[in-house]
Amino acid sequence: MATRGRFITLEGLEGVGKTTNREHIHSLLADKNIDVLVTREPGGTELGEQLRHLLLHASTAVCAESELLMMAASRKQHTVEVIEPALRKGLWVLCDRYVDASFAYQGGGRELGAETVASVHELLSIDIKPDLTFLLDMPIADGLKRMAERGKPDKIEKEALAFFERARAAYLQRAQAQPARIKVVDASRALNDVQQQVQNELQAFLARCHG
Ligand code: T5A
């Protein structure tokens, strides 16, 4: 039987550099001959990508609770169809956002609270936890500015600053509560510096995996 793979996630608000650093981590793992499946949420499956479109681009109104349930539906499908089978096969999974995003955006941003988010995940038995999470953190306005330079915002990117402040606070609170798993990276620095810290944390993680 293959040794179970490891599950690494990237988290943070808009424009903090998750996609950029996901590629960096992928290439660092590839250099170590580790087979990696790269994926994202919401999305990662056919159903998930359709839900992503509804959540981010459709004109349909979605209340906070429905948004949480749709994120969770995308996650459950992704977990059973893609993530769990890959981990069982021994692949490493590198995912742009996972459960922490719902605690930040729906629990914090939408003010549904951590307990509601936790109970939905419990109900759906979404119980795998990432082994390592990079939380890329920077002032909200700077991240949104990076995104604005890229073009038309999606529905969530159009939210008020207070929404992102609550989401950022919820992310940082989770990182404080789970320091062994969630590594906070100051994403406001030059890309080289950000990537150096990501590399150092990844090397420490690899050493722990082999130790
Ligand atoms: N959501 C998601 C929920 O509400 N609940 C949930 O449970 C989940 C899973 C998903 C949306 O859904 C919400 C959160 C989101 O609003 P998304 O597209 O996955 O949307 O998330 P975005 O944050 O919008 O992702 P982006 O890909 O658009 O942004 P990234 O990946 O954080 O940023 P990236 O790497 O594309 O970089 C942005 C720009 O900055 C530059 C890059 O070159 C790029 O141009 N950059 C830097 N520039 C200077 N210095 C650096 N250090 C830089 N790093 C990157």
Image (spheres, helix red, strand yellow):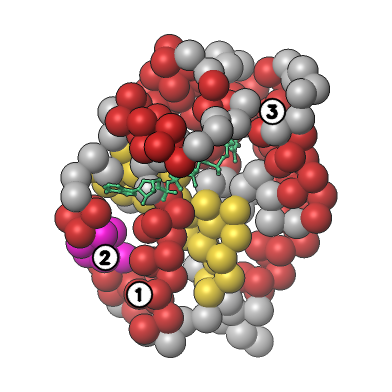
User: Residue 116, position in %: x, y?
Assistant: 64, 22
Q: Amino acid at mark 3?
A: Leu
Residue receiving disc 2: 199
Q: Is residue 189 left or right of residue 47?
A: left
Q: Which residues are magenta?
A: 195-202
40 or 56: which is nearer to us?
56
Tell me which label, 1 or 2, sits earlier in the chain.
Answer: 1
Q: Amino acid at mark 2?
A: Gln
Disc 2 versus disc 3: distance between alpha carbons? 32 Å
User: Residue 188, position in %: x, y?
Assistant: 23, 40
Q: Secondary structure at mark 2?
A: helix
- Whether the residue carrying mark 3 lies under 8 Å from ligand 1 is answered with yes
Residue receiving disc 3: 68
97 or 113: which is nearer to us?
97
Q: Is residue 113 above or below residue 42?
A: above
User: Residue 138, position in %: x, y?
Assistant: 29, 34
Tell me which label, 2 or 3, sits earlier in the chain.
Answer: 3
